[in-house]
Amino acid sequence: MSRDARWKALLELLVERGRLDVEEAAAELEVSAATIRRDFDQLAEQQMLVRTRGGAVVHGVSYELPLRYKTARHASEKQRIAKAVAGLVAPGEAVGLTGGTTTTEVARALAVRSDLASGSPALTIVTNALNIANELAVRPQFKIVVTGGVARPQSYELIGPLADGVLAQITIDVAVLGVVAFDVTHGAAAHDEAEAAINRLLCERAERVIVVADSSKLGQRAFARICAADAVDTLVTDTAAAPDAVRRFEEAGLKVVAV
């Protein structure tokens, strides 16, 4: 197993469990305890975790795993969600995409739709996510609008007043919103308040709003609120979503698509 693969696996285990012991992690990944100690030390130097005697704990109460380490979490669910969301977009529409692993999958699903292989433009994509813009920029049939702003390394999203200025001048047909938590009472949320502010403005500029969230994010809360649940038109999630959670969203007026 490569170092990058080990680091991804270690961080995912750490976020899931909150704490890892060296021996436990070594057994999980089938490597030596000495290797895990070195990995923990190097990740601690990058402030990705907090080293403890004999192991490590997550870095802070509201820990956010950087995007490059999150791609494998709930991967199949995210791909199904993305395909369903791509089917809700009509040719020629202006589509806003926030950052995140699920919205990145939405971008990829849009890119392979055969009916969007040509057009002038086939879609207009507005995004504050550098990785999404980078992936779609090679598609000449898509018009790519990047908001500008200051790059946030955890999510590759652009934030700040420069992004505000661009979004205030445009309107879009649909905003596809990636979230870290979505609850009927507390709404859609992100870890970072500046990121939430940009995502909120993108939603305000949209005719309709789609939240993409795998079932692990439903009924959860996070630090920075993006918008209220009633500002969302459609929730696309996976079939593992609890029936009670789905019912509450539907009673709040959302269309729920579980795939």
Image: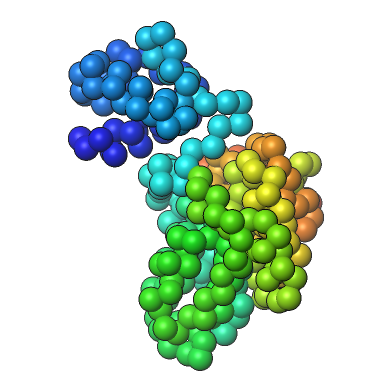
Tell me: 166 left or right of 128. Answer: right
Residue drawn at (63%, 56%), measured in percent from left and top? 159
Depth order, front residue of 26/246: 26
The residue sitting at 40% across, 42% down in the picture is: 69
User: Can residue 93 be spotted in the picture?
Assistant: yes
Please report the residue visible at 68 percent of the width from the left and 49 percent of the height from the top.
Answer: 194
Q: Would you say 60 lies left or right of 234 here?
A: left
Q: Front-most of 163 and 244?
A: 163
Quadrant of residue 51 in the image? top left
Residue lying furthest bottom: 120
How many marks overall? 0
Q: Position of residue 18 (x, y in %)?
A: 50, 22
In front: 150, or 222? Answer: 150
Does 84 appear above or below 91? above
Residue 40 or 115: which is nearer the viewer?
A: 40
| Relative to 17, residue 229 above or below | below
Q: Quadrant of the N terminus?
A: top left
| Residue 52 placement: quadrant | top left
On the rendered structure, is 20 left or right of 154? left
Q: Is residue 170 above or below residue 181?
A: below
> Residue 220, position in %: x, y?
65, 37
Residue 167: x percent and y percent? Answer: 70, 69
What colour scheme does the image use?
Answer: rainbow
Query: Residue 84 location, x and y as percent?
Result: 51, 64
Q: Is residue 234 visible?
A: no
Q: Is residue 231 left or right of residue 152?
A: right
